[in-house]
Amino acid sequence: MSLLSPLNDQHNALGATFTDFSGWQMPLHYGSILKEHLHVRESVGIFDISHMGAVFISGRESAVWLDKHLANDLESLAIEQAHYSFLLNDDGGVIDDLIVYRLAEDVFFVVPNASGVDAVTNHLISCIGEADVRLENRSGSVVSIAVQGKLSQTLMQGVFPQIDFSDLKKNDLKLVDGESDSLIIARTGYTGSDGFEIFTDVEEGRALWDRLINNDLGVECHVCGLGSRDTLRIEAGYPLYGNELNTSLTPIQAGLGFFVGAELKQTLKERLPENLPKIVYFKVLEKAPPPRSGYEIFEGESSIGKVTSGCLSPLLGEGIGFALVNRKISLNESEKYAIFIRNRKYSLMFVKRGII
Protein backbone atom coordinates (compact mmCIF):
# COMPACT_ATOMS: atom_id res chain seq x y z
CA MET A 1 0.00 0.00 0.00
CA SER A 2 1.32 3.45 -0.93
CA LEU A 3 2.17 6.02 1.69
CA LEU A 4 -0.12 9.03 1.74
CA SER A 5 0.87 12.66 2.09
CA PRO A 6 -0.63 14.47 5.09
CA LEU A 7 -2.26 16.68 2.42
CA ASN A 8 -3.89 13.77 0.61
CA ASP A 9 -7.45 14.87 1.46
CA GLN A 10 -6.72 18.32 0.03
CA HIS A 11 -5.41 16.77 -3.20
CA ASN A 12 -8.51 14.61 -3.59
CA ALA A 13 -10.75 17.63 -3.05
CA LEU A 14 -8.82 19.50 -5.79
CA GLY A 15 -9.31 16.67 -8.28
CA ALA A 16 -5.72 15.44 -8.46
CA THR A 17 -4.65 12.58 -10.68
CA PHE A 18 -2.23 10.49 -8.64
CA THR A 19 0.92 8.53 -9.38
CA ASP A 20 3.12 6.24 -7.33
CA PHE A 21 6.47 7.86 -6.56
CA SER A 22 8.98 5.94 -4.47
CA GLY A 23 6.16 4.24 -2.59
CA TRP A 24 4.10 7.41 -2.10
CA GLN A 25 0.76 8.23 -3.70
CA MET A 26 1.38 11.78 -4.91
CA PRO A 27 -0.40 14.16 -7.33
CA LEU A 28 0.84 13.80 -10.91
CA HIS A 29 -1.26 16.74 -12.07
CA TYR A 30 -4.55 18.54 -11.47
CA GLY A 31 -5.65 18.55 -15.09
CA SER A 32 -2.69 19.64 -17.22
CA ILE A 33 1.05 19.22 -16.73
CA LEU A 34 1.68 21.84 -19.42
CA LYS A 35 -0.53 24.46 -17.77
CA GLU A 36 0.96 23.81 -14.35
CA HIS A 37 4.48 24.15 -15.78
CA LEU A 38 3.66 27.49 -17.40
CA HIS A 39 1.93 28.77 -14.25
CA VAL A 40 5.25 28.41 -12.43
CA ARG A 41 7.23 30.12 -15.18
CA GLU A 42 4.69 32.96 -15.54
CA SER A 43 3.17 33.39 -12.06
CA VAL A 44 3.32 31.05 -9.05
CA GLY A 45 2.66 27.38 -8.37
CA ILE A 46 2.44 25.35 -5.18
CA PHE A 47 3.68 21.76 -4.80
CA ASP A 48 3.23 19.23 -2.05
CA ILE A 49 6.69 17.70 -1.54
CA SER A 50 5.91 15.93 1.74
CA HIS A 51 7.21 12.67 0.26
CA MET A 52 10.72 14.07 0.67
CA GLY A 53 12.67 13.05 3.76
CA ALA A 54 12.94 15.10 6.94
CA VAL A 55 15.92 14.28 9.15
CA PHE A 56 17.05 16.46 12.08
CA ILE A 57 20.64 16.19 13.28
CA SER A 58 21.85 17.90 16.45
CA GLY A 59 24.46 17.66 19.16
CA ARG A 60 27.72 19.30 20.20
CA GLU A 61 29.74 17.54 17.47
CA SER A 62 27.06 17.61 14.75
CA ALA A 63 28.76 20.22 12.55
CA VAL A 64 32.19 18.56 12.55
CA TRP A 65 30.59 15.12 12.14
CA LEU A 66 28.41 16.15 9.18
CA ASP A 67 31.35 17.92 7.58
CA LYS A 68 33.22 14.61 7.68
CA HIS A 69 30.44 12.60 6.07
CA LEU A 70 29.03 14.96 3.41
CA ALA A 71 30.72 15.94 0.17
CA ASN A 72 31.21 19.67 0.68
CA ASP A 73 32.38 22.10 3.34
CA LEU A 74 29.73 22.30 6.02
CA GLU A 75 31.78 24.66 8.17
CA SER A 76 31.25 27.37 5.54
CA LEU A 77 27.49 27.07 5.97
CA ALA A 78 26.25 29.92 8.16
CA ILE A 79 23.32 29.68 10.54
CA GLU A 80 20.07 30.19 8.59
CA GLN A 81 21.64 29.04 5.33
CA ALA A 82 21.20 25.92 3.19
CA HIS A 83 23.21 24.17 0.54
CA TYR A 84 23.10 21.22 -1.82
CA SER A 85 25.29 18.24 -1.01
CA PHE A 86 25.87 14.50 -1.46
CA LEU A 87 26.24 11.49 0.77
CA LEU A 88 28.79 9.25 -0.95
CA ASN A 89 29.80 5.60 -0.63
CA ASP A 90 33.41 4.42 -0.36
CA ASP A 91 33.79 4.42 -4.16
CA GLY A 92 32.50 7.99 -4.52
CA GLY A 93 29.09 6.88 -5.82
CA VAL A 94 26.07 8.87 -4.68
CA ILE A 95 23.99 7.27 -1.94
CA ASP A 96 21.71 10.31 -2.24
CA ASP A 97 21.77 14.00 -3.04
CA LEU A 98 20.20 16.23 -0.42
CA ILE A 99 19.75 19.72 0.94
CA VAL A 100 21.25 20.63 4.31
CA TYR A 101 19.69 23.49 6.31
CA ARG A 102 21.59 24.92 9.27
CA LEU A 103 18.98 25.99 11.81
CA ALA A 104 21.37 26.80 14.67
CA GLU A 105 25.02 26.34 15.58
CA ASP A 106 24.55 22.62 16.29
CA VAL A 107 21.15 21.90 14.70
CA PHE A 108 20.76 20.78 11.09
CA PHE A 109 17.79 19.75 8.95
CA VAL A 110 18.59 17.33 6.13
CA VAL A 111 16.17 16.66 3.27
CA PRO A 112 16.95 13.50 1.28
CA ASN A 113 14.90 12.16 -1.61
CA ALA A 114 11.88 9.98 -0.84
CA SER A 115 13.72 6.99 -2.30
CA GLY A 116 16.83 7.72 -0.25
CA VAL A 117 15.47 8.21 3.27
CA ASP A 118 16.29 4.72 4.53
CA ALA A 119 19.69 4.60 2.83
CA VAL A 120 20.66 8.03 4.18
CA THR A 121 19.46 7.46 7.74
CA ASN A 122 20.91 3.95 7.97
CA HIS A 123 24.28 5.11 6.64
CA LEU A 124 24.45 8.13 8.95
CA ILE A 125 23.36 6.16 12.02
CA SER A 126 26.08 3.59 11.32
CA CYS A 127 28.64 6.43 11.33
CA ILE A 128 27.68 8.04 14.65
CA GLY A 129 29.71 5.76 16.91
CA GLU A 130 30.73 7.67 20.05
CA ALA A 131 30.15 11.12 18.54
CA ASP A 132 27.91 13.56 20.42
CA VAL A 133 25.31 13.52 17.65
CA ARG A 134 21.58 12.83 17.70
CA LEU A 135 19.59 11.90 14.61
CA GLU A 136 15.78 12.12 14.45
CA ASN A 137 14.05 10.85 11.32
CA ARG A 138 10.71 12.68 11.08
CA SER A 139 10.04 11.69 7.47
CA GLY A 140 6.32 11.26 6.86
CA SER A 141 5.31 13.50 9.76
CA VAL A 142 6.48 16.79 8.21
CA VAL A 143 4.47 18.75 5.67
CA SER A 144 6.79 20.15 3.00
CA ILE A 145 5.46 22.73 0.55
CA ALA A 146 7.24 24.34 -2.40
CA VAL A 147 6.04 27.78 -3.56
CA GLN A 148 7.69 28.40 -6.93
CA GLY A 149 7.49 31.02 -9.66
CA LYS A 150 8.26 34.64 -10.45
CA LEU A 151 5.42 35.87 -8.20
CA SER A 152 6.39 33.62 -5.31
CA GLN A 153 7.99 36.43 -3.31
CA THR A 154 4.84 38.55 -3.61
CA LEU A 155 2.73 35.69 -2.30
CA MET A 156 5.11 34.80 0.52
CA GLN A 157 5.48 38.43 1.61
CA GLY A 158 1.73 38.68 2.01
CA VAL A 159 1.43 35.43 3.94
CA PHE A 160 4.46 36.05 6.16
CA PRO A 161 4.67 39.85 6.63
CA GLN A 162 7.11 39.44 9.56
CA ILE A 163 9.86 38.44 7.08
CA ASP A 164 11.47 40.90 4.68
CA PHE A 165 11.80 38.58 1.69
CA SER A 166 13.72 41.17 -0.31
CA ASP A 167 16.62 40.53 2.12
CA LEU A 168 16.32 36.73 1.90
CA LYS A 169 18.90 35.63 -0.66
CA LYS A 170 19.10 32.32 -2.54
CA ASN A 171 19.62 29.48 -0.01
CA ASP A 172 18.89 31.72 2.99
CA LEU A 173 16.25 30.61 5.50
CA LYS A 174 14.17 31.92 8.39
CA LEU A 175 12.46 30.21 11.31
CA VAL A 176 8.95 31.44 12.09
CA ASP A 177 6.73 30.53 15.06
CA GLY A 178 3.38 28.99 14.12
CA GLU A 179 0.35 27.95 16.13
CA SER A 180 1.48 24.35 16.68
CA ASP A 181 5.05 24.24 15.36
CA SER A 182 7.83 26.36 13.95
CA LEU A 183 8.09 26.79 10.19
CA ILE A 184 11.37 26.54 8.28
CA ILE A 185 11.11 28.91 5.29
CA ALA A 186 13.97 28.73 2.80
CA ARG A 187 14.65 30.36 -0.55
CA THR A 188 15.35 27.02 -2.22
CA GLY A 189 13.59 24.99 -4.88
CA TYR A 190 13.79 22.52 -7.74
CA THR A 191 12.21 24.36 -10.67
CA GLY A 192 14.78 26.90 -11.85
CA SER A 193 12.37 29.73 -11.07
CA ASP A 194 12.48 31.84 -7.92
CA GLY A 195 10.81 30.15 -5.02
CA PHE A 196 10.63 28.94 -1.45
CA GLU A 197 10.27 25.70 0.46
CA ILE A 198 8.44 25.48 3.77
CA PHE A 199 8.65 22.69 6.37
CA THR A 200 6.44 22.28 9.42
CA ASP A 201 4.17 19.84 11.25
CA VAL A 202 0.96 18.39 9.84
CA GLU A 203 -1.50 20.74 11.57
CA GLU A 204 0.45 23.86 10.61
CA GLY A 205 1.10 22.55 7.10
CA ARG A 206 -2.53 21.82 6.27
CA ALA A 207 -3.57 25.30 7.38
CA LEU A 208 -0.76 26.89 5.37
CA TRP A 209 -1.65 24.95 2.20
CA ASP A 210 -5.23 26.25 2.35
CA ARG A 211 -4.05 29.76 3.17
CA LEU A 212 -1.70 29.88 0.17
CA ILE A 213 -4.33 28.63 -2.27
CA ASN A 214 -7.13 30.80 -0.92
CA ASN A 215 -5.08 33.93 -0.27
CA ASP A 216 -6.75 37.36 -0.56
CA LEU A 217 -3.62 39.05 -1.93
CA GLY A 218 -4.67 39.11 -5.56
CA VAL A 219 -2.09 36.40 -6.37
CA GLU A 220 -3.54 33.35 -8.07
CA CYS A 221 -1.68 30.35 -6.62
CA HIS A 222 -1.95 27.28 -8.85
CA VAL A 223 -1.65 23.76 -7.48
CA CYS A 224 0.94 21.67 -9.33
CA GLY A 225 1.88 17.99 -9.38
CA LEU A 226 5.01 15.94 -9.87
CA GLY A 227 4.55 15.91 -13.65
CA SER A 228 5.32 19.61 -14.00
CA ARG A 229 7.94 19.40 -11.25
CA ASP A 230 9.79 16.96 -13.51
CA THR A 231 9.57 19.05 -16.69
CA LEU A 232 10.55 22.18 -14.75
CA ARG A 233 13.66 20.57 -13.29
CA ILE A 234 14.69 19.19 -16.71
CA GLU A 235 14.42 22.69 -18.21
CA ALA A 236 16.53 23.98 -15.33
CA GLY A 237 19.12 21.23 -15.78
CA TYR A 238 18.61 19.71 -12.32
CA PRO A 239 19.32 15.99 -11.82
CA LEU A 240 16.93 13.40 -10.41
CA TYR A 241 18.26 10.64 -8.19
CA GLY A 242 17.83 7.28 -9.89
CA ASN A 243 18.12 8.92 -13.31
CA GLU A 244 21.20 11.17 -13.37
CA LEU A 245 22.58 10.09 -9.99
CA ASN A 246 23.11 6.66 -8.44
CA THR A 247 25.55 4.64 -6.35
CA SER A 248 27.64 3.80 -9.43
CA LEU A 249 28.15 7.38 -10.62
CA THR A 250 30.27 9.97 -8.83
CA PRO A 251 29.25 13.66 -8.73
CA ILE A 252 32.16 14.30 -11.11
CA GLN A 253 30.64 11.97 -13.72
CA ALA A 254 27.27 13.61 -13.15
CA GLY A 255 28.76 17.01 -13.98
CA LEU A 256 28.21 18.27 -10.44
CA GLY A 257 31.78 18.51 -9.22
CA PHE A 258 31.31 22.18 -8.25
CA PHE A 259 29.19 20.94 -5.30
CA VAL A 260 32.08 18.85 -3.96
CA GLY A 261 34.78 20.10 -1.61
CA ALA A 262 38.12 20.82 -3.29
CA GLU A 263 40.13 18.04 -1.63
CA LEU A 264 37.48 15.36 -2.20
CA LYS A 265 36.94 16.57 -5.76
CA GLN A 266 40.64 16.12 -6.53
CA THR A 267 40.60 12.64 -4.97
CA LEU A 268 37.60 11.58 -7.04
CA LYS A 269 39.17 12.92 -10.23
CA GLU A 270 42.38 11.01 -9.59
CA ARG A 271 40.43 7.77 -9.17
CA LEU A 272 38.44 8.13 -12.38
CA PRO A 273 39.67 6.84 -15.74
CA GLU A 274 38.87 9.38 -18.48
CA ASN A 275 36.69 6.95 -20.42
CA LEU A 276 34.05 6.44 -17.72
CA PRO A 277 30.45 7.29 -18.71
CA LYS A 278 29.20 10.75 -17.81
CA ILE A 279 25.94 12.69 -17.71
CA VAL A 280 25.45 15.35 -20.40
CA TYR A 281 22.61 17.67 -21.42
CA PHE A 282 21.11 17.77 -24.90
CA LYS A 283 18.64 19.59 -27.13
CA VAL A 284 16.87 17.94 -30.08
CA LEU A 285 17.27 20.06 -33.22
CA GLU A 286 14.27 18.79 -35.20
CA LYS A 287 10.58 18.55 -34.49
CA ALA A 288 10.26 15.15 -32.87
CA PRO A 289 8.25 13.15 -30.32
CA PRO A 290 9.36 13.65 -26.70
CA PRO A 291 12.71 12.10 -25.78
CA ARG A 292 12.22 9.50 -23.06
CA SER A 293 14.41 7.58 -20.66
CA GLY A 294 16.17 4.71 -22.41
CA TYR A 295 16.21 6.18 -25.93
CA GLU A 296 19.57 5.65 -27.63
CA ILE A 297 22.01 8.41 -28.57
CA PHE A 298 24.25 7.96 -31.65
CA GLU A 299 27.43 9.45 -33.00
CA GLY A 300 27.25 8.42 -36.64
CA GLU A 301 26.36 4.72 -36.60
CA SER A 302 27.77 4.11 -33.12
CA SER A 303 25.51 4.06 -30.08
CA ILE A 304 27.23 6.18 -27.41
CA GLY A 305 24.62 6.24 -24.66
CA LYS A 306 21.03 6.52 -23.56
CA VAL A 307 18.65 9.20 -22.33
CA THR A 308 18.25 9.28 -18.55
CA SER A 309 15.53 12.00 -18.47
CA GLY A 310 13.79 13.86 -21.26
CA CYS A 311 10.73 15.87 -22.26
CA LEU A 312 9.41 18.42 -24.69
CA SER A 313 10.25 21.77 -23.14
CA PRO A 314 7.00 23.69 -22.58
CA LEU A 315 8.98 26.93 -23.05
CA LEU A 316 10.74 25.99 -26.28
CA GLY A 317 8.54 23.23 -27.69
CA GLU A 318 11.78 21.31 -28.32
CA GLY A 319 13.10 18.04 -26.97
CA ILE A 320 15.58 18.41 -24.11
CA GLY A 321 17.07 16.17 -21.48
CA PHE A 322 19.99 14.32 -19.97
CA ALA A 323 21.89 11.34 -21.32
CA LEU A 324 24.56 9.01 -19.99
CA VAL A 325 27.24 8.73 -22.69
CA ASN A 326 30.32 6.55 -22.81
CA ARG A 327 32.69 8.78 -24.74
CA LYS A 328 33.97 12.33 -24.89
CA ILE A 329 31.46 14.63 -26.58
CA SER A 330 31.68 18.15 -27.96
CA LEU A 331 29.23 20.95 -27.27
CA ASN A 332 27.20 22.78 -29.93
CA GLU A 333 27.98 20.31 -32.75
CA SER A 334 24.79 20.43 -34.82
CA GLU A 335 25.53 17.64 -37.29
CA LYS A 336 27.39 15.09 -35.21
CA TYR A 337 24.84 13.41 -32.93
CA ALA A 338 21.34 11.92 -33.16
CA ILE A 339 18.66 10.39 -30.96
CA PHE A 340 16.65 7.32 -31.99
CA ILE A 341 12.91 7.84 -31.40
CA ARG A 342 10.20 5.54 -32.77
CA ASN A 343 12.34 3.95 -35.47
CA ARG A 344 13.86 7.21 -36.69
CA LYS A 345 16.93 9.27 -35.90
CA TYR A 346 16.62 12.98 -35.10
CA SER A 347 19.61 15.30 -34.90
CA LEU A 348 20.58 16.71 -31.52
CA MET A 349 23.45 18.58 -29.98
CA PHE A 350 24.92 18.62 -26.52
CA VAL A 351 24.72 21.98 -24.77
CA LYS A 352 25.46 23.51 -21.41
CA ARG A 353 23.08 22.25 -18.74
CA GLY A 354 19.66 23.89 -18.59
CA ILE A 355 17.79 26.26 -20.89
CA ILE A 356 16.66 28.88 -18.34
Image (cartoon, helix red, strand yellow):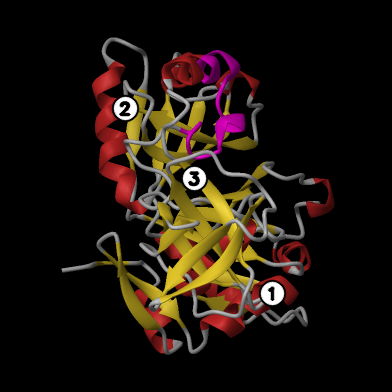
State which quarter of the image contains the N terminus: bottom left
Q: Is residue 144 magenta?
A: no
Front of the two marks 1 and 2 = 1
Real-space Cα separation, disc 2 to disc 3, in angstroms: 27 Å
Against 54, residue 104 (above or below) is: above
Q: Mark 2 — residue?
A: 124
Q: Mark 3 — residue?
A: 279
| Residue shown at the point (56%, 37%) measured from the top left | 256
Q: Mark 1 — residue?
A: 316
- The image quarter containing residue 157 is bottom right
Against 235, residue 133 (above or below) is: above
The first of marks 2 and 3 along the sequence is 2
The first of marks 1 and 2 along the sequence is 2
Instruction: Tell me if I can see residue 49 in this picture.
Output: no
Q: Is residue 56 left or right of residue 247?
A: right
| Residue shown at the point (35%, 25%) measured from the top left | 134
Q: Which residues are magenta?
A: 251-266
| Residue shown at the point (53%, 76%) measured from the top left | 224
Q: Nearer the viewer, residue 245 or 8?
A: 245
Q: Amino acid at mark 2?
A: Leu
| Residue shown at the point (65%, 65%) measured from the top left | 148
Contact (Cβ within 8 Å) of mark 2 with mark 3 = no
The first of marks 3 and 1 along the sequence is 3
